[in-house]
Image (tube, rainbow, N blue to C red):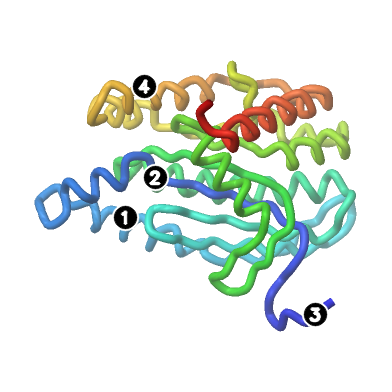
Amino acid sequence: MRNYRDGYRGPAIIGFVDLLGFSRNLAEGWGTDNDVLPKILDLKDSFNKYKANPGRMAIDGRLLYFSVAMHTVSDSFIITCQIPIQNDGLVLMAALGNVCMGVDEVQNFAVGNGFAVRGGVELGELFIRGQEVIGPAFGTAYELESTVAIGARTILGPALMREIGRLYDHRWSMTRGSYCRTSDDLMAVRDPTPDLEQMHQLQARAPSARTAAKYDHFFEVQKPSDYLAARHEWLEVADSTEQKLRLARKGPV
């Protein structure tokens, strides 16, 4: 295989998170008292404190190195975590946990600055070098965010859920309550500390009833979840999400 110098090419989990309504707010408020540029810069500065977080974790008696990186492009936030060992369920869930902590950081910072977020998290091949993130998993995470998530929530991708189902392990009790199966058969990342009052304010300030309705998804996925999804649930939701992706790729008939 070609030497990619300081780059990494291999399996990884990627989260792609976007701010809802940012482009419209930016255009309408540019250069006025309602300019959102200072807010997005504050948000990016806060997020960039977590820009690179290489660390070691003890998993099943092994000390493993996880390389977590965070990037920003305009109003989009990208979190990646390399998979140090394949075919290991505990390692997979630890990597997913690292990415979801980044997603939580984005959501908490965003809500504090008056924005809601929408995102997708997927497993697959990536090339990561510095600020560059390229690969098929990136494309799918973007599609999940832009065409499947619909409202203010971050959902998991089909390849990731199938791998979770394949490697399912009873020791995953640590993940209890972290993910929530939604009414439209998606698996969403559940923020453990949502500020619902701020989210209701966001909904009230939405520029249209259609935009306000998108925030309903946020409240739906925040309902308490005290169960650990069974193997068959991960696989069922993977199939449902894959079908939604295929329909979105076809476009309107």
Q: Nearer the viewer, mark 2 or mark 1?
A: 2
Q: Give the residue at mark 1.
A: 40
Callout 1: helix, strand or loop? Answer: helix
CA separation in Å, label 2 and label 1: 10 Å
Residues under numbered marks 1 and 3 in contact, where contact means CB atoms less than 8 Å apart:
no
Residue 213 has which mark? 4
Q: Nearer the viewer, mark 1 or mark 4?
A: 4
Q: Amino acid at mark 1?
A: Ile
- Marks 4 and 3: CB-CB under 8 Å? no
Give me the C-alpha separation between circle 4 and circle 3: 49 Å
Query: Does residue 245 appear in this view?
Result: yes
- Residue 236: image location, x then y, percent: 76, 23
Disc 2 + disc 1, Cβ < 8 Å: yes
Which mark is nearer the camera, 3 or 2? 3
Residue 19 shows which numbered tag?
Answer: 2
The residue pinned by badge 3 equals 2
Dot 4 falls on a residue whose secondary structure is helix
